[in-house]
Image (spheres, rainbow, N blue to C red):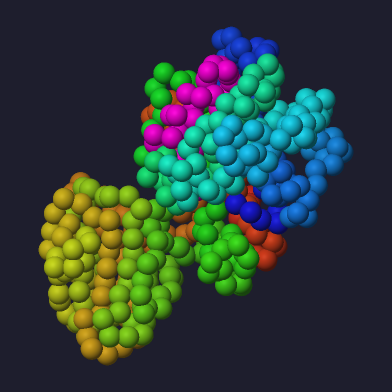
């Protein structure tokens, strides 16, 4: 992501030790060992990922490598906009002067005993028009692979930063095509790959990797909650408003859930949601980023009488209508009644009146599983971050792949105390897992 801050990264997962080899020929060393070499990585952002170095206010100076080495960093991630320095038509030749600049920075990394990641960054044309730009992307990787095939294994490749937009539908196929091209000249080099939707942590579950290629490190980027980390960001449309703070004890929707409500103001407090419906038929819409199975009931207490519609799937015909009591009472709604016979991906609690209503408090709102366990939909910001990383760690363990948090950070317009608190908390949770 384009920003005006340098993001610090850290490796994720307990890493296995092994031995190192030269010239792109790992012997008795696996991807877990190489991931450990990236344990303290810093991004040199906004330099070579800009259309021209310096255009975004950052020119990489030689002394930067000495400074980061002195500060204890083990690697530099170098975002590179290769597509801005190559022909638009076949043979898509990369400018020799640009190769020389990347060579210079790669040499500085080696001279300062620092690993370096050559990250294929900001190929927006591929995101927007995948089929029209596939051959150019593969040709660029063919040239990069040939150019660096004799470099030591301290040089890492990153296949593509944050695949998104239309490319989401093609990424499973293109990931394999890109790796195939790289492996023609770099059969053993470590390549960093990530999931679609901007390398989102919740997309790890759908990431498909070649089973026989074990020289891969899986990356993800972490900017949650987005409205905090990107408040006031000029490149985001619409930009989240300023003044959002972060504290690990502050109430938040639980991990994997987002607020998609319409004509509704809501406030989280404790394990409760305070709801103001600002219009007729307004809705509190809590959306899960995964399809959930194994739950049987939605449970909450309400403090006032109101006609409501409950829906837990996309089909509006499945909505369950009922009226809460004037007296505070607990309600347990069978999910089958609101469309959730097989599973759910949302909880919509809609105002089924022809006028606005305010002051509804949904207390202890939760899902009850068939085995009796409970999932509270309101938790704390710290618990949500912890749950995100725990889930990612479970994925990595199950798939026997090392994980690398390639980017995380909060934009400079957030208050400094919250930024420091969030950054420390995220780093600590990553290191735990």
Residue at 18% across / 68% down in the picture? 316
Tell me: residue 67, above or below residue 276: above
Q: Is residue 190 highlighted in magenta?
A: yes
Left or right of 165, for residue 342 = left
Whether 99 is drawn above or below 360: the answer is above
Q: Position of residue 424 (x, y in %)?
A: 64, 50
Left or right: residue 247 compared with residue 307: right
Q: Which residues are magenta?
A: 172-201
Residue sitting at the far front: 90
Q: Nearer the viewer, residue 75 or 198?
A: 198
Foreground pick, 142 / 182: 142
Percent position of residue 150, x then y: 68, 16
Residues 158 and 432: in front is 158
**What is the quadrant of residue 362 in the picture?**
bottom left
List x then y, in percent, for residue 132: 46, 43
Q: Nearer the viewer, residue 103 or 201?
A: 103
Identify which residue is drawn at 46% across, 20% down: 213
């Amino acid at each position: 992501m384009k920003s005006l801050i340098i993001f610090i990264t850290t490796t994720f997962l307990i890493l296995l030790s092994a031995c190192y080899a030269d010239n792109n020929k790992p012997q008795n060393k696996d991807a877990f060992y190489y991931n450990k070499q990236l344990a303290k990585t810093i991004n040199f952002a906004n330099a070579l990922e800009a259309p021209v170095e310096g255009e975004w206010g950052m020119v990489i100076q030689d002394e930067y490598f000495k400074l980061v080495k002195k500060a204890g960093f083990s690697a530099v991630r170098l975002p590179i906009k290769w597509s801005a320095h190559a022909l638009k038509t076949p043979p898509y030749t990369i400018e020799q002067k640009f190769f020389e600049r990347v060579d210079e920075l790669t040499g500085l990394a080696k001279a300062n005993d620092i690993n370096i990641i050559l990250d294929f960054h900001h190929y927006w044309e591929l995101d927007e028009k995948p089929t029209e730009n596939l051959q150019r992307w593969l040709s660029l990787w063919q040239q990069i692979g040939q150019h660096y095939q004799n470099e030591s294994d301290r040089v890492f490749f990153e296949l593509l930063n944050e695949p998104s937009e239309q490319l989401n539908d093609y990424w499973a196929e293109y990931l394999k095509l890109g790796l195939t091209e790289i492996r023609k000249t770099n059969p053993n080099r470590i390549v960093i790959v990530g999931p679609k939707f901007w390398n989102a942590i919740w997309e790890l579950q759908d990431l498909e990797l070649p089973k026989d290629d074990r020289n891969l490190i899986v990356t993800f980027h972490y900017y949650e909650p987005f409205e905090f980390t990107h408040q006031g960001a000029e490149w985001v449309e619409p930009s989240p408003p300023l003044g959002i703070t972060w504290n690990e004890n502050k109430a938040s929707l639980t991990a994997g859930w987002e607020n998609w409500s319409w004509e509704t103001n809501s406030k989280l407090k404790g394990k409760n949601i305070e709801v103001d419906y600002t219009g007729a038929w307004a809705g509190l819409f809590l959306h899960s980023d995964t399809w959930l199975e194994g739950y049987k009931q939605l449970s909450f207490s309400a403090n006032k009488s109101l006609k409501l519609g409950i829906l837990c799937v996309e089909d509006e015909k499945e909505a369950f209508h009922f009226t809460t009591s004037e007296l505070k009472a607990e309600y347990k709604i069978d999910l089958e009644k609101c469309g959730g016979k097989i599973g759910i991906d949302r909880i919509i609690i809609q105002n089924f009146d022809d006028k606005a209503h305010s002051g509804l408090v949904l207390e202890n709102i939760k899902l009850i599983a068939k085995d009796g366990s409970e999932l509270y939909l309101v938790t704390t910001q710290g618990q949500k971050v912890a749950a995100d990383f725990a889930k990612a760690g479970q994925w990595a363990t199950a798939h026997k792949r090392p994980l690398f948090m390639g980017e995380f950070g909060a934009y400079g317009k957030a208050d400094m105390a919250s930024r420091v608190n969030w950054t420390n908390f995220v780093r600590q949770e990553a290191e735990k897992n």
